[in-house]
Amino acid sequence: MESFESHFFYPIKDTVIDPDGIGVRENIEFNAKIIFYVKTKQGIIVAIDYKVKACPVAIAVASFLAKTFKNKTIENALSIDENFLNSNLVGIPKERLECEIVLLKLLKKL
């Protein structure tokens, strides 16, 4: 298991040049915006970069997903769900769980 705090304070991501997929989600009400950049090679996710202007939970979950999805097949990454997140990323405040769901859905739309 990994902690919310470790991914918030020490986020993990790659630098993606010429991405194969870009996902954008914006919430004007909360002044939040999340952008994911994904690079693939032969059906494998080789790099994930992101920009997050949102709450600490969004930053931590983006980092965790970037680490978790890297070097996975696209099909394997798409199979990751909320249960997996809740079992492997601990410490997310209950009132902020919707952030993890939004990020997971955004990455799956790429």
Image (cartoon, grey):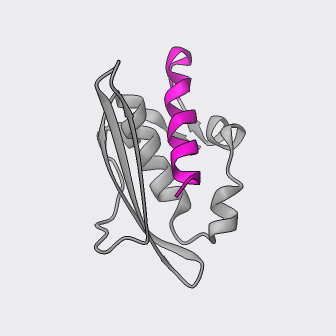
- Is residue 92 on the magenta stretch? yes
- Is residue 102 on the magenta stretch? yes
- Could you tell me which residue is drawn at 49 percent across and 37 percent down? 3
User: Is 15 on the left-hand or right-hand side of 59?
Assistant: left
Q: Which residues are magenta?
A: 91-110
Figure quadrant of the N terminus: top right
**Where, by quadrant of the figure, is residue 56 drawn?**
top left
Whether residue 51 is situated above or below residue 87 in the rendered picture: below
Q: As rendered, which of 62 and 5 lies closer to the eye?
A: 62
| Residue 72: x %, y % from top left | 60, 69
User: Is 94 on the left-hand or right-hand side of 30?
Assistant: right
User: Is 10 on the left-hand or right-hand side of 40?
Assistant: left
| Residue 109: x %, y % from top left | 56, 53
Q: As rendered, which of 107 and 64 lies closer to the eye?
A: 107
Q: Residue furthest bottom?
A: 42
User: Is 13 on the left-hand or right-hand side of 20?
Assistant: left
Q: As rendered, which of 19 and 54 lies closer to the eye?
A: 19
Tag count: 0
| Residue 47: x %, y % from top left | 42, 69
| Residue 96: x %, y % from top left | 49, 21
